[in-house]
Image (spheres, rainbow, N blue to C red):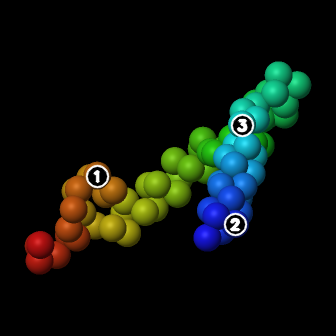
């Protein structure tokens, strides 16, 4: 039984030690700051997509409000 506990403890320690070095290094910040690395790489394209989504959703507010435009909430 103590071997099992020791094994579980070793696995937990190894798993938690892998998270000790989480973060962005100073030399990686330049790469992550590029326009093509952003979540929304092209703001105009994103605005057009949101406009199409809101138009097709047919509800007031689009993403921010619950329910559809049919009135069957």
> Taking the image as drawn, is residue 7 in sight?
yes
Residue at horizontal 33 percent and vertical 67 percent from the top: 57
Position of residue 61 measured from the top left corner of the image (x, y, whole percent): 26, 53
Quadrant in the rendering for residue 70: bottom left
Q: CA separation, marks 2 and 3?
A: 26 Å
Q: Nearer the viewer, mark 3 or mark 1?
A: 3
Q: CB atoms at circles 2 and 3 under 8 Å apart?
A: no
Q: CA separation, marks 3 and 1?
A: 38 Å
Tag 1 or tag 2, which sits nearer the N-term?
A: 2
Q: Nearer the viewer, mark 2 or mark 1?
A: 2
Position of residue 10 measured from the top left corner of the image (x, y, whole percent): 72, 55
Which element is circle 1 on?
Answer: helix
Quadrant in the rendering for residue 36: top right
Which element is circle 3 on?
Answer: loop
Which element is circle 2 on?
Answer: helix
Residue at horizontal 46 percent and vertical 61 percent from the top: 52
Residue at horizontal 65 percent and vertical 55 percent from the top: 9
* Mark 2 burial class by Cα count in 10 Å: few <14, some 14-19, many 20+: few
Residue carrying label 2: 3
Which quadrant, please, contains the C terminus? bottom left
Residue carrying label 1: 64
Q: Which mark is residue 7?
A: none
Tag 1 or tag 3, which sits nearer the N-term?
A: 3
């Amino acid at each position: 039984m103590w071997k099992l506990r020791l094994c579980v403890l070793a696995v937990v320690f190894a798993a938690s030690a892998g998270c000790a070095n989480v973060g962005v290094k100073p030399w990686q910040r330049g790469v992550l700051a590029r326009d093509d690395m952003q979540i929304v790489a092209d703001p105009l394209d994103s605005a057009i997509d949101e406009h199409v989504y809101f138009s097709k959703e047919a509800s007031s507010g689009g993403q921010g409000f619950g329910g559809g435009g049919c009135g069957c909430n």
